[in-house]
Image (cartoon, rainbow, N blue to C red):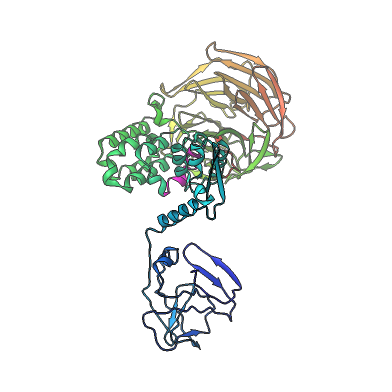
Amino acid sequence: MGPDSTSSTPSSASTNNSTSSLSTSNTTSTLASLSGLGGLSGSATLPRSVNSSCVSLKLPLTERELNRGVFQHHLQLTQSFPGGTGTPVSPTTAVILANGGVVGGGGEPMSVPLAHKNPNHASNAFDALNKMRQSNQLCDVTINVGGVSIPGHKVVLAAALLPASSLLQMSLVREACCKFLLRQLHPTNCLGIRNFADTHACKELQTRSHRFALQNFPEVMNTEEFVMLPLEEVEELLGSNQLNVTNEEQAYAAVMAWVKHDADQRRSELSRLLSKVRVPLLSRRFLMTVVDSEGLIRDDAGCKDLLLEAMRYHLLPEQRASLSSERTIERKPDGMRPYIFAIGGGSLFAIHSECECYNPRTDRWAPVAPLLTRRSRCGVASVGRLLYAVGGYDGTSDLATAETYNPRSNKWSGIAPMGTRRSCLGLCSLDGLMYAVGGYDGASCLNSVERYDPLTGVWSCCPALSQRRRYCRLTSLDGCVWAVGGLDASNAIAAVERLDPREGKWVSVPALSQRRSSAGLAALDGNLYCVGGSDGSACLATAEKFDPRRLRWESIASMHTRRSTHELVSVDGALFALGGNDGSSSLSTVEKYDPRLNKWILLNAMLTRRSSLGGAVLDCLPMDRPARPC
């Protein structure tokens, strides 16, 4: 409100950045005396129906009054006042309401082209503050340096608090400023705070704001700060292995958004930035329908080379190990940790869709989203940052369907079904591909093998096992797929086979020391571990280890509990045996094996008893963590 304003007593007051306003009761209105307003004459009327408050100002305003801040925010009085009848006021008065409306001359709405903008207001204000400081007027802070006292105003110091504290080596103030900025981190400002911290040598603030930008990149990439970054800083973000993106499509979208923000100046940098995207990990559909059809990509020779590299990676899945590069490695954002997932299974006469995950660092189980379809005797494996549940038995029939779990959204979604119904199958991943081996189709044991490529979404046939088997266990080690034990038409078997995808055939290797079907199998520290299972007459607690270099199986410590149809996974240098059946009932118990001590210990049990379950390890961010400063 202007310095010469008068008003009736308001019921409440409020202010905002651009105008001052007073809220009045329904029967109270405030009049503003505006002298000399364009030669107004006649009777000005204030409608009774209006409940808004008024801002009172006398005109003409002096330059001094304007420079003191009145109307400093483009006060444009051009809005019409609502109609109605009211009480006449003085012929030389008009009314300005807080919303900008003007009434005068008989109550008719007026449009008064009164506007003022003072571009020197900020500098004038600080000049005035400096003169006040020099004359020691309204000073509210004193800086003592070397016996000299310097009076000042807190508002001026606050405007440059962090640079001033750095310059004056006031470490406590500097730390307080940095802590404040850390609490303000948000996807819309983290890049600006990072650059500000870098300018003022606030290393921890710079590091943590950079980490925040990486962890919240899907939101950061859609901000104005991102598209205004210089090339080198965009390159640094996209090239980080810790960049947190759901998939490489987001990284590609970020590149295109930055380039297209100023295409004429930035198109020459497209191939340089695209090389930081894991282009071979883009899905085939995305490559063909989005990337290949982009005009900026097609016009750039460097981009076309990157596209050809990706297509070779897609078309030659057996050679992916030899085609590996930094662009074929999955990113691993900071904070990602391995979690163990227990999927489906059964207990008594029930088939489960419920799933749960285990945090090895806290020894706690927690439920996650249930499967779309109830599944027992299914195969479970992880590829990249997704979990897959394939085949199984739903209580009525054997299944060919499959689904995938995304921990980021905590949701399952369907994928293409296998070519064959399979329960009691073996499943594992190798070089970004998933192998489904053997199993039972509802009529007979199988020796057929299928392979799923998440990049293409297609299942394809692979060389068959030399022996039909169900309840065999599968894992990957040394670039090969290993199939261990199982059940043929009627008997448990000890046979072991190995598939090298580059050679395209299965090769027999030394058999287990005893027959095992429905055992647990996992690779750890270059060795295979086969644990528990059934020998055809009883469930087993025994376990053995295979050294591929010595081609020998040897016994290790037995579990505390006999188990078959359980799951075995390896995490952080240890083995975990989950659930299963002890010959009389389904189990919820969990055991952990430490190979250095050759010892099993009991852990917290699962939330649900599960036999014939699927299990796998998946690296993911804590599922309950919101976006926050790191």
Q: Looking at the picture, how far across and down is residue 245, in whole percent?
A: 47, 40
In the image, 382: left or right of 280? right
- Residue 627 seen in the figure: no
Task: Kindly identify the residue that appears in the image at 45 percent across and 66 percent down.
Answer: 70
- Residue 224 seen in the figure: yes
Task: Kindly identify the residue that appears in the image at 36 percent across and 80 percent down.
Answer: 38
In the image, 243: left or right of 303? right
Task: Kindly identify the residue that appears in the image at 48 percent across and 41 percent down.
Answer: 163
In the image, 116: left or right of 209? left
Residue 74 in the image: above or below residue 331: below
Q: Is residue 418 magenta?
A: no
Q: Looking at the picture, how far across and down is residue 81, in whole percent?
A: 45, 79
Residue 19 in the image: above or below residue 628: below
Q: Which residues are magenta?
A: 208-223
Q: Looking at the picture, how far across and down is residue 121, in whole percent?
A: 41, 59
Q: Main secondary structure of the magenta part?
A: helix
In the image, 176: left or right of 229? right
Q: Looking at the picture, how far across and down is residue 176, in whole percent?
A: 57, 41
